[in-house]
Image (tube, rainbow, N blue to C red):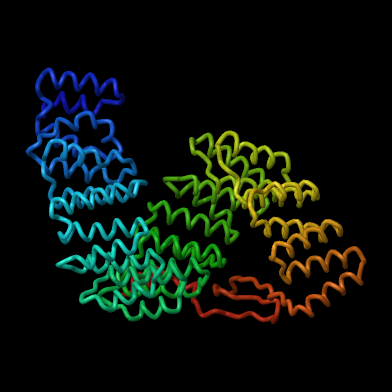
Amino acid sequence: MQPWLSSLLGACRSRTHLDQLQAHLLKTRLEASPLLSEYLLHLPASGLPFFLPFLSFLPSSYPFLHNSLIRSLSPSSSSLCLLPFIAMRRSFLPPDSFTFVFSLKAASSTAEPSHGEQLHAQALLHGLSSHLFVSTTLITLYSELGRLRSALKVFDEMPVRNVVSWNAVVSAYAKAGDVAGAWRVFCFAPVRDSTSWNIVLAGLVRSCGDLARAVMVFRLIPEHARDSVSWSTMVSGLSMHGDYHQAFVFFRESLRAGALPNEVALSSVLSACANSGALALACSLHGFLDKAGLNGLLPACNSLLSAYAKCGDVPAAEKFFWLCMEQKSVVSWTAMAGGLAAVGRADEAVQLFLEMELQGFTPDAAAFISLLQACSHGRLVELGQNFFSIMQTKYQLTPSVEHYGCMVDIYARAGRLDKAFEMAMMAPTKEKEVLWRTILGACVVHGEVNMAEEVERKLVEMGHGEAGDCVLLSNVYARAGRWREAARVRERMRNQRMDKPPGWSSVEVGAKASTLSGQAVELQHTPSRQGDNLLAFAAAE
């Protein structure tokens, strides 16, 4: 390709530029140049739609050019990704197996199920529906569409199957929520690989949350078949379901086994640190990230920042945020603002939010939750009202129950229980129990007996009455000196056998995670060795 043509193509920024270049190519007869086609195929997928006017210039005798263009466009969720296939059919160029594989992958990313069905019909018409790669891709397509029966029908009609085909069917069962069916197919498969085991693990952990069986299956995996995906699936699944101790155990095991953790495992174990208050382990993981050269992974950095903030070490979070993070996202700013709000530095959290806007970041729904929480902690009622309005008018964000909960908390902390009640009534959701319990807790502080009675009645009517609600109502009566009513509520709890689970806290004592329960005043040490240096584990061979 001539250098001037390459420069012009790279400089096109509007449809007008393309029209002018297209006219020039037609005039100089350069439109059919194979080099031009090759240049178009190496463009990033995001820029290809601007060059679709050149689609008709692709030589009709080169099907691989059309196939490559389909593959390049397949990440797009637009139906434009199938235009090269349509152009092939209009030019009577016969599609091959690669054409259907790439086209079916492109169809799975669109929002129109009929695209996949039409491609399936075309594959049948050209005698390629039983091709190994085409059939496997069809199974994946129908699995993405939630059509398990169609996927199984394609599989049953396959004359030849390989491990990828079997994995596709196992995945189809798992995505449909039928983990037992996925396990049956897995056991019946004549050959398995790491992907086979990982699909079953993911189904057990994410689809049905059967952690005990997931651990059992993981122990059955041959050591040579355990890869980073296997370990990260277990760590993320255990962390997601709140079993932080086991998440730490599996993470340390993976390091001892010599498996380099990926960003999913790192983000999950750091999230477990944040939720369990394991600050010592978070500090060790910070050193591990630096030593392993993984401190450029933004998701892991965001999780580390969140761990520092949620564990209460806000100075370390600030240092990491301002000095160590080369890249930042909305998640980064939100985590930092949330950390400042949690320790009562509400004004600084608001200023950080404004700084984020000045930096060109668009706040999302989670950012506004942190911002409203800061307003709640700082008793910034008017500011919270303004931000609640801005998120809807300026950023077109629809408030969720979490946003309404923050507004209820803002009013409740300020003693404006009437406004809190009004906000709870305005929330466009039926799941309001969290909002009512926030108001009920505020009634204890401010001694609002009548409102407490009304809120407790609403919780009972919703079918969400719990022992904790009765305890709060009893405390409201006791605070007002109405001991008879308080005793009556306690009697009702005994008659209905309503037991309130004891409260507990997780703290670090001597670099160990410890649980302090309200039922038994004793520290229960977990043998997690969270204070151990992970760098030593990573270096051990």
Q: Which quarter of the figure is the C terminus placed in?
A: bottom left
Q: Position of residue 416 (x, y in %)?
A: 80, 48
**47 relative to 378, above or below:** above
* Quarter of image, res 184: bottom left
In the rendered image, residue 500, in percent from the top left (x then y), is placed at 71, 74
- Seen from the viewer's position, the closer of residues 443 and 433 is 433
What percent of the width, then of the height, locates residue 136? 22, 61
The image shows residue 156, relative to residue 324, as above or below, that is below
Q: Which residue is more in the foreground, 526 or 288?
A: 526
Residue at the spot 61% in from the left edge and 70% down from the top edge: 507
Mark yes or no: residue 364 visible: yes
Q: Quadrant of the N terminus?
A: top left
* Relative side of 313 to 346, left or right: left
Residue 345 in sight here = no
Identify the residue at horizontal 12%, vertical 17% (top origin).
Answer: 27
Task: Name the spot of residue 369 as percent of width and height, x first.
Answer: 60, 48
User: Where, by quadrant of the figure, is residue 436 drawn?
Assistant: bottom right
Q: Residue at x 43, y 66 (%)?
A: 236
| Number of numbered discs overlaid on the protein picture | 0
In the shown orientation, is residue 257 left or right of residue 464? left
Is residue 283 depicted above or below 515 in this figure?
A: above
